[in-house]
Image: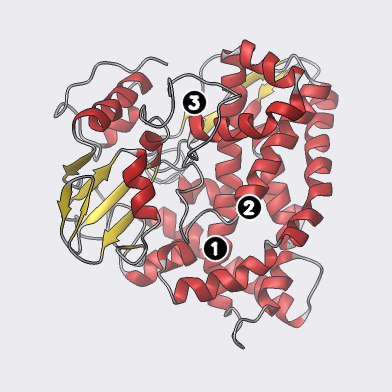
Amino acid sequence: MTPADVALGSFDLSDPAFWTAPRDVREGAFATLRREQPVAWFDEWEFEGNPFPKGPGYWALSSHDDIWHVSRNPQLFSSGKGVNIGDMPLEVSEFFGSMISMDDPKHFRLRSIVSKGFTPKEISRVEEYVRQKATAVVDRLLEEFPDRECDFVTEVAAPMPLQIICEMMGIPPEDEARVFHWTNVILGVGDPEYAGTFEELMVSAMEIFQYAQALGEDRLKHPKDDLTSIMMHAEVDGERLTAQEFGSFFILLVVAGNETTRTAISHGMHLLTQHPDQRDLWWSNWDTHTKTAVDEIVRYATPVVHFRRTATEDTVVGGQKIQAGQKLIMWYCSGNRDEKVFADPHRFDVTRSMQPAQVGFGAGGPHFCLGANLARREIAVMFDEIRRRMPTLHTVGEPDYLQSSFINGIKRLRCAW
């Protein structure tokens, strides 16, 4: 994609209309910011139906270096004031965000407990059913779609990560459809198809929270061989997760673990269709290129578009003075296109070296994605299964994108083979 020529001052990152503009226009806007004003001020938008007051505005960070700096200095840049652009009460922020909306020592305590479910030993246990789930997805395509055409998101990209998270957590298969619906609503805020109002969002959030609390309390009394049991019984300095803490973490895990991997796989298939030379290059030398190809898919797709930090004291970022209490929005979508870091950044290249790293999983620091290695493995295994068993699978037409400034989601994407 070649970015459009977009003049500084002709766009507003806070305007919902910006996020429905053509993608070359959006890429051009961020290219202009990186070149002319990498730390730029934007006023916040007044959203109809938002129960919380309009915020004072924020600094938009568009360069890779500034995003890297802010992510890796948590003492200066707090997550505990909120990780989304709009302000909301602390208890609401933690309800939706769990530990990503916390600072140390609270963040360290919670991450230390839940990370016991993401040790190399636990992730290695998942390896076998990552392959099983990917195999089952392709089996179903070959058996149930005689016309050799379907929606790639619904039938391929969504089922595997959802099933893996559900199986890891001990969620029965008959509840997967409910979990899928809840995640769509929670991350679909702003898209009328999923959640048009804050009330709709809260209904789904409370349903998933209550479901999680009941699951956690059950595993506390009747532990099983699943991640829920491990986390509910894990102790750090004699402390365990409360049912409420587990409920909020459950929202974070099933939403992040499902939606972001689904998004990366969907974008990945579309990119490989658009760039058959890169597809051939990767698939003809699988072992050599898989690591870089998966990271390139995540870089190019950037499933999570942004996160926020709040300055804890007066400081300077990218030469711009920042006052204590001001918000900084790390636009990962822009950092992953930074011309100073990635040569020809708008080119999809499965052999691209990721030194320095792409920021699709965050830019390091204490909030780096806990499930990054699991996500990488899921993406690799799904495409390996397609490569070996459905090598002619390709997308048809353009994706139907989620209307969101937070998730670079694809709702529907036709494919054929």
Q: Residue at x 49, y 41 (%)?
A: 360
Q: Estimate the spatial distance between the alpha carbons at disc 2 and disc 3, rounded to whole Å.
A: 22 Å
Label 2: how many Cα within 10 Å (few below 14, some 14–19, many 20+): few
- Which residue, given by chain and number where applicable, does mark 3 sit on? 400
Foreground mark, 2 or 3, reads 3
Q: Earlier in the sequence, mark 1 or mark 2?
A: 2
Furthest toward the top, the residue is 277
* Nearest to the observer: residue 350 or residue 201: 350
SS for dot 1: helix
* Nearest to the observer: residue 176 or residue 262: 262
Q: Amino acid at mark 3?
A: Asp
Q: Earlier in the sequence, mark 2 or mark 3?
A: 2
Image spot of residue 314 (x, y percent): 17, 62
Q: Estimate the spatial distance between the alpha carbons at disc 1 and disc 2, rounded to whole Å.
A: 10 Å
SS for dot 2: helix
- Quarter of the image that includes the C terminus: top right
* Nearest to the observer: residue 209 or residue 234: 234
- Which residue, given by chain and number where applicable, does mark 2 sit on? 178
